[in-house]
Each structure stands twice: as C-alpha cells, then as structure tokens.
Amino acid sequence: KAGVTQTPRYLIKTRGQQVTLSCSPISGHRSVSWYQQTPGQGLQFLFEYFSETQRNKGNFPGRFSGRQFSNSRSEMNVSTLELGDSALYLCASSTEQGAIYGYTFGSGTRLTVV
Amino acid sequence: GENVGLHLPTLSVQEGDNSIINCAYSNSASDYFIWYKQESGKGPQFIIDIRSNMDKRQGQRVTVLLNKTVKHLSLQIAATQPGDSAVYFCAETSGAGSYQLTFGKGTKLSVIP
C-alpha cells in the first residue's frame, strides 16, 4: 500500500515568488492536513481539507492557501514568498474528517526561499 | 537533519539502556496524546498514543505515561537500539472536532553503540 506522497521533495524559490506543493494521500483517505516544520517554531498546523472543503485553518497569513481535488489529492500554495517561509512542509492523510487517530505523514517538501 | 533545531533538547543513551523522553503540555482540555518519531529526511511516524482517561499505555518496547495533574507526558523506550536514534515529538489534541494536532518542540535521542 503506497504511503502519502509529497512532491517535489526539494524546492528553491526566490523571495516574492509563489510556490505550489502537492500531496497525494493514501488510497481511501479523504482527509488531508498540512503542517509547517521549522527549527524555531517546530511543527505548526496550516489547514485541513476533507471532501474538497477546508475544515480548519491554523494561524497563518492569507498568503498560505490550499485546495483539495475530487480524488482527495491536495495542493498548498504560498504566494509572495518570504525568507521565513523556508521550512519543511508536511502533509498527513487520514480516513475521516479530523481523524487524527489515523494520521499518516508524508516525507515532506523542503522549501528554501533565497 | 531537517528537523534539528538550534535549541532542541538532546538525550544520549547507551545501546541497551532504557530511555525516558519527557513532554509538558499546556492545554488542560487536551484529551488525546500521541508520540511521534521523526528520522532525518522523513515525516513523523506514529509510535504510541494515549487517551486522557488512562495514565499508562504499553506497546512493543515503548510505554507512555500521562500525568494530567501536572500536564506531563513521558515516553519510555526499553532496551534502546541504534535504530531508535531520531527526534521524538509529543502531540496533543482536544479530540473529535479538533481537526489538528499541537506538537511539542521535540527531543533528539542519540543512541551510543
């Protein structure tokens, strides 16, 4: 059974640019959550999607957005990149909405903003 | 590794010894707690969980203890092995309807062969 797949694994962008990251959940999982991981702030919740709808959002500026497709794949977008957006972006999938009990994380996308 | 912070608490143990990793949480409404292991270049991996109506839960070589009075969680790893070297995070949530985990800062465990 394939795990949670995140692409790309590494990304380098310039300040002011925008970026789109992709997450393919485990087959059958309908909930996708995104987290940002930095050395200073640790792991912080960005948002959760279920059935193509954002159900919950963390305390991040509006430059961070996402969406979920009918096949449960999810993308997150960061516009007008800042140096502080450099981080490991992790997605986690689970079967039900907010089903944190069954969270499975991907390996993440390492974003570097220069 | 990708998840090592400048101020990440560290714990070094000899192979074969027992390890104890501690975590303090702040939300008294949290009713579900999870320990994750994160190896370099990988996402967090589930180790063990515990609900607030329990104070101890055991898995294979791991035990989680919960003290709600002082809002403290610990992970005990028996007979620590080199493969246990990783960063360990505790996470909490207020359960159904919460939709998100709140993570602790993490502890880096190094096992000395």
Image (cartoon, helix red, strand yellow):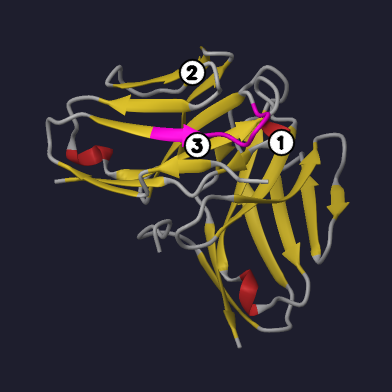
Residue B78 lies, in percent from the top left, at 78, 72
Disc 1 target residue:
A102
**Residue A99, image quadrant:** top right
Disc 3 and disc 1 in contact, CB within 8 angstroms: no
Disc 3 to disc 1, C-alpha distance: 13 Å
Q: What residue type is labelled 2?
A: Phe
Residue A84 lies, in percent from the top left, at 23, 39
Tell which subunit mark 1 falls on.
A
> Most extreme residue toward the bottom, as rendered?
B113
Disc 2 to disc 3, C-alpha distance: 15 Å
Q: Find numbered disc 1 in the image and state the secondary structure of the residue it sits on.
A: helix
Quadrant location of the C terminus of chain B in the rendered image: bottom right
Residue B82 lies, in percent from the top left, at 62, 78
**Residue B31, image quadrant:** top right
| Disc assigned to residue A69 | 2
* Residue at screen point 55% across, 22% down: A71
Between discs 3 and 1, the one toward the N terminus: 3
Q: Find numbered disc 2 in the image and state the secondary structure of the residue it sits on.
A: loop
Disc 1 and disc 2 in contact, CB within 8 angstroms: no
Disc 3 target residue:
A91
Task: Categorize mark 1 by other alpha carbons within 10 Å: few (<14), some (14-19), many (20+).
Answer: some
> Most extreme residue toward the top, as rendered?
A53
Tell which subunit mark 2 falls on.
A
Task: Categorize mark 2 by other alpha carbons within 10 Å: few (<14), some (14-19), many (20+).
Answer: few
* Residue at screen point 44% across, 46% down: A108
Q: What residue type is labelled 3?
A: Cys
Between discs 2 and 3, the one toward the N terminus: 2
Seen from the viewer's position, the closer of residues B56 and B68 is B56
Closer to the eye: label 2 or 3: 2
